[in-house]
Amino acid sequence: MAESTNDGPPWFAYFPDGSVHLGGVPERLLRHPEMYRRGINLTDALKPAVVFRAASDEPAYVVKVLDLDTEELPIYERLLSDIHAPRNHTIPYDIYREGHPLLIMPYVNTLSSLVEAEDRSPSQLLDILYQLTESVEYLHSLHIAHLDICEGNVVAALPNDVQYHPSVVARKIYVIDFNTSKQLRLGPGVQHAITLPPTQIPPPHDLKHFDPYSWDVYCLGRLCRDVIESYSYDGRSVPWIAQWYAQWLLGEERGCHTACRCRPTARIARRLLLVIRLLRSVIELCERVYLWIWKPPTT
């Protein structure tokens, strides 16, 4: 059976009997000249007919077929123009533009790999929550609403990833997948509710309309709550302030149709968490000094 000749996704792969192979890589990508040029050997699909990976070799890559009926390509083009900004949590990538646009990016670790690391500490947990909040604030500063913030759309670079992809930063969190994202004329605090696209996190009270920026913050709160649960999977204690912070982001939803006041903006949330991290650092320093001064003499 011949493969679809449509430019945009889905790009299906097929078994020899003509049935769709959801986990496979289409021939048009396997034979793609850019894959040959880069030595990328795609092995399977992360998202059937849309996102594919080359995980059998190092360095490993992800290739996404961009949907030109969405705003994903112009959003990536904007983010690429400022890719080295510390607040920009977009993973470094290339856009292949000859023929149908393809997004080619490093294949790095999952967010849970960073959250559940053996050497994790309360300070590192707060740093993860801070990075997540900073990533949303940066998008909102550009009037971009992601609209599908969740664990599946966040990855993390570990030291072993940097070995193969020097463009990524160790222990930095990256937001991916902008296929349902929107560029908005108005910014946080003034933007009215819009009709939500399909999302991985169900809206509270089955709401269909949401302030898009506030929706991102709500999803951020859900993600922070999931991060905290993963962090404490082995009984490790969690700072109460981290649990309070996640709940604060979730807020009390009232179904606002104008600019939402049910939860903080990402900017306010990031600034408060910065203060919390600084205070915790001071407290930890005081504790170490106290223990050093009052350390019992050795016999």
Image (cartoon, grey):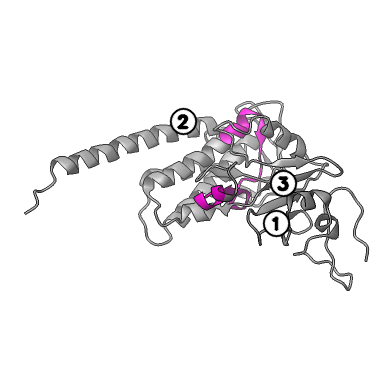
Q: Tell me residue 103's x, y (percent).
A: 74, 45
Residue at 60%, 27% in the rendered image:
189
The three-letter amino acid code for the residue at tag 1 is Arg
Q: 56 left or right of 133?
A: right
Q: Distance from label 2 to label 1 (Cα)?
A: 37 Å
Q: Which mark is residue 271?
A: 2
Q: Earlier in the sequence, mark 2 or mark 1?
A: 1
Viewer-side label of 2, 1: 1
Magenta span includes 144: yes
Q: Is residue 296 left or right of residue 47?
A: left
Kind of residue indicated by mark 3? Ile
Sort mark 2 into few (<14), some (14-19) or many (20+) by Cα contacts within 10 Å: few
Mark in the foreground, 3 or 2: 3
In the image, what residue type sits under mark 2? Arg
Neighbourhood count class around disc 3 (C-alpha, 10 Å): few under 14, some 14–19, many 20 upward? many
Percent of width and height locating residue 27: 85, 60
Q: Which residue is mark 1?
A: 53
Dot 3 falls on a residue whose secondary structure is strand
